[in-house]
Image (spheres, grey):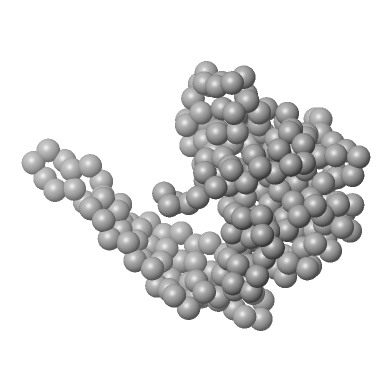
Amino acid sequence: MEDMPYAEWMNLARSCFERYGMPHSVVDLGCGTGNLSIPLAKSGFEVYGIDISAEMLAIARSKWGEPPVRGKGGSIRWLQQDMRDWELPDPVDAVISFCDCMNYLTAESDVTATIRQTYAGLKPGGLFLFDVHAPRTLERYAEEQPFILDEKDIAYLWTSDYDHKSRTIRHDLTFFVREEASIGGAGLYRRFEESHTQRAYDPEWLVTQLTHAGFELLHQCADFAWTPPTDTSERLFFIARRPS
């Protein structure tokens, strides 16, 4: 994940807020280990980092620190919740869901539930920003796999299997992580495995789900630029607003 463009996500969010209204409270839906929640809080926003993984939230908390370094007066509250039915006591000004979180919802009904729940959790006039992998991006992963990393302290083998009918891809990763060397001995490598399944969605279908939930679509763009998506776009962005 060290090459992920977190700065570009932050720049796009800030640019969107400048265009459509600066929020005070922001939900980072699918916040993972806090790589976007923390910069948002340090910029002065009241942030709610929501993720289903207790392990990722534990890492996020350790990054933020106890007591937190509040930067320009921002704050974070970490919450373990499912993005399909997340809920806060009070509505917020904006919700972001970046790093293809929506692709991890492999049933259409789950995407619809997330969009509707987000609408319910926003104040009138609130913004919803999210991104997804374009269908072609998942196909490309399958065409270009396997992926191999071989460094001193970590190595992995990453394979991908794409199902064209369901537009789903399964990523299987085998990691070898070097343990600290014992006195007088060489370090051994610990092996562990992960599997990730994602699904691609037709952009027009996503727009339909937004409008059916009550959102006003403000803008569609791609690959961290404000230009419209093309057939070669890899990451698609959607910017919507709950009407005032």
Q: Measured from the top left, where is residue 33 in percent x and y?
A: 52, 41
Q: Measured from the top left, where is residue 224 in percent x and y?
A: 59, 54
Q: Nearer the viewer, residue 156 or 201?
A: 201
Q: Residue at x 88, y 38 (%)?
A: 124
**Up/down of 165 relative to 23, above or below:** below
Q: Measured from the top left, where is residue 195 in percent x and y?
A: 49, 62
**In the displayed structure image, the side of residue 188 where residue 109 appears, left or right:** right
| Residue 3 visible within the image | yes
Q: Residue at x 64, y 39 (%)?
A: 14
| Residue 105 visible within the image | no
**Up/down of 239 relative to 69, above or below:** below
Examine the image and state in which quarter residue 95 appears: top right
Q: Residue at x 74, y 33 (%)?
A: 23
**Up/down of 156 relative to 48, above or below:** below
- Which quadrant holds the C terminus? top right
Q: Residue at x 79, y 67 (%)?
A: 205
